[in-house]
Amino acid sequence: MDDLENETAVRDRPDCLVVGATGFIGRWLVAELLTRGQSVAVTVRGGGVRGGELRSWLREHDVDDTRLTVVDADITRPDLALSASDRERLEDVRDVFNAAALYRFGLEREEARRANVDGALNVLRWAGGLPRLRRLVHVSGYRVGADGALTYPVPEAESNALYRKYGVYEASKREGDAAVRTAAAEEGVNLTVVNPAGVIGHSVTGEAGQYIGPAEMVKNLWAGRLPALAGTRRTFVPVVTIDHLARFMAAVPDHDEGAYEAHWVLDDATPELPEMIGLVARHLGLRAPRAILPAGLVRRLPRAVTGVEPETLTFLSEDRYDTTSADTLGLMHPPVEDALRRWADRLVAERFGASRPPLPGGFHLVGNTRTYLAGNRRSPSYVLLHGLPFNAETWRDVVAELDAPALVADMPGLGRSARSAGDATEWLADLMAPVDSRPVLVGHSAGTAPVLRYAHAHPERVAGLVLVSPYFLQRRPRWHMRTPALLAPVLRTASARRLGRALLGSRDQALDDMVADLRRPGVAWRTARWLGKAQRRTERDELRALVDDCPVPVHIVAGEFDPLVGDPVGVPVTVVPGAGHNPQVTHPAQVAAAAG
């Protein structure tokens, strides 16, 4: 048994090391290497906690982490500050992948150099001391290595000019690239430099995890803060999906043989920038900017006016790049336009990294409207529609409490969904078209109107209704809440957060989601118009009558502090103690119990 344990221990000693494994590129590379059956070590500054986070991420992605070794290291220190025991554990490492970098705009020069220059050199020199080293794979950038003229050490005057021209981030990466190439030649380390384009999300799921660079442009487009593009109509900002890049990097050590290799890893089929932004805009149901301004002009304008980070302007070029060496590995890029759409969907769903992971779902065409859906679209037991001014995420905790599958959606023109030319009832009919079950429809506040009307039109498709805080059975709000011209400006400003806090209490995530939605172009105005219409007496009287004469069972849920004004005769009512107008957010278990 002891011999078997020793043999297993030797076999599972790491044969490769990933530096920067908790970063965007690093963690996907670790997943790829483990999936290939390799024993992988990773360096994590601080060790335990971040190593645990990486293991959790791998398990969430169905990657077996039993052959993963985590060591505590610091690339800014000589020999990576490894302990003697960790150095011994890593003696069998043949391939070192350095994906560590400080990727942020607005960095201080010395802060960036510690990681991107000194750190890169420390990794190379440590790797050069490994007894079985085969190759060091260093991640640089598609613009960084394009010139190839920089020498190291960089003379002071040339260095100062470099940092002025390119900004701190790109200049530090260019300096680091030169430093690594020079040191590898001096120390006899076989080196491959991988120069990736802008890295976007997974080609199948769209999952990103990095929200600067190209993602920042999509964020500004989504928020209505991209009135014009910088560059020209031929500006080329290439991309590569994260899964393709991870596969490529993992394959490099078995492919490259020379002392030095460099590969430009990008999808040459990436549309030119105006076309790429147009593709994303059409997919998101937005207007693409028509104006294109020279990058030099944009650089001279205040950032407060342009909304553009000046350091990103150096990436706007018409240059093309030679991918011949990368193509020899024989890996095909996934279709780039599909990948861009899925990535944009995921960015929007995740609110560009500002919120917790969304309910698992994506965007679908419902009633000719791009609609965010989550859950079971074919055979749900429950279909849940949110109220104003929220989105489907307000049902998150209710869905977790339900004992059967549910379908939730962002209503048209609200949340993450595009606006619709038709009304909400027509949209709901199209949402229900592919459903082959007979679900309970659950509507909150404004969402109660379409579920009521749908139940009357299609009683054979509905098992019952749950009306949560039905606004038409409650006290009308004050007059200014019924006047769109007065309400819309309030919803677009900081007052929206105060209003939301009054509605939701201290649910900061729901508040952040609400405020982000209301700041999207047109959402505040649509919300105000919807609220105005919902408070008309004719509308309220019609919906009251639909409750009294509903062809399917109806159950009403109301908060203790948001009572009904006259309970409908013969309709069961659940009053949630301590709740206001949004019990689905504040008291999800009670709402789920009433729905069930």
Image (cartoon, rainbow, N blue to C red):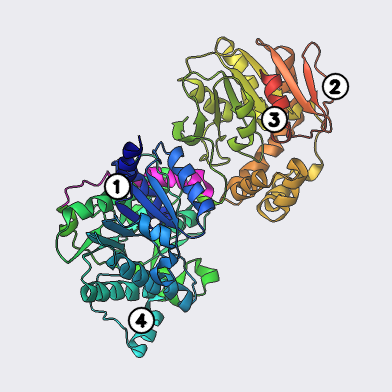
The residue labelled by disc 2 is: 566
Please, what is the three-letter code of the amino acid marked with disc 2? Answer: Gly
Residue 224 at what x, y percent from top left?
52, 55
- Please tell me which of labels 3 and 4 falls first in the chain: 4
Quick check: is 340 in the magenta stretch?
Answer: yes
Which residue is painted at 61% across and 42% down in the image? 526
- Please tell me which of labels 3 and 2 falls first in the chain: 2
- Neighbourhood count class around disc 3 (C-alpha, 10 Å): few under 14, some 14–19, many 20 upward: many
- SS class of the residue under badge 3? helix
Residue 268 left/right relative to 409: left
Foreground tag (3 vs 2): 3
- Work out whether residue 553 can be spotted: yes
Judging depth in this view, the residue of 187 and 437 nearest the camera is 187
Which residue is painted at 61% across and 29% down in the image? 400
Q: What is the distance, in whole Å, between disc 3 and disc 4 at their CAs?
A: 56 Å
Q: What is the distance, in whole Å, between disc 1 and disc 2 at their CAs?
A: 57 Å
Please, what is the three-letter code of the amino acid marked with disc 1? Answer: Val
Judging depth in this view, the residue of 8 and 242 nearest the camera is 8
Foreground tag (2 vs 4): 4
Q: Are marks 1 and 2 in contact (CB under 8 Å)?
A: no
Q: Are marks 3 and 4 in contact (CB under 8 Å)?
A: no
The residue labelled by disc 3 is: 588
- Please tell me which of labels 1 and 4 falls first in the chain: 4
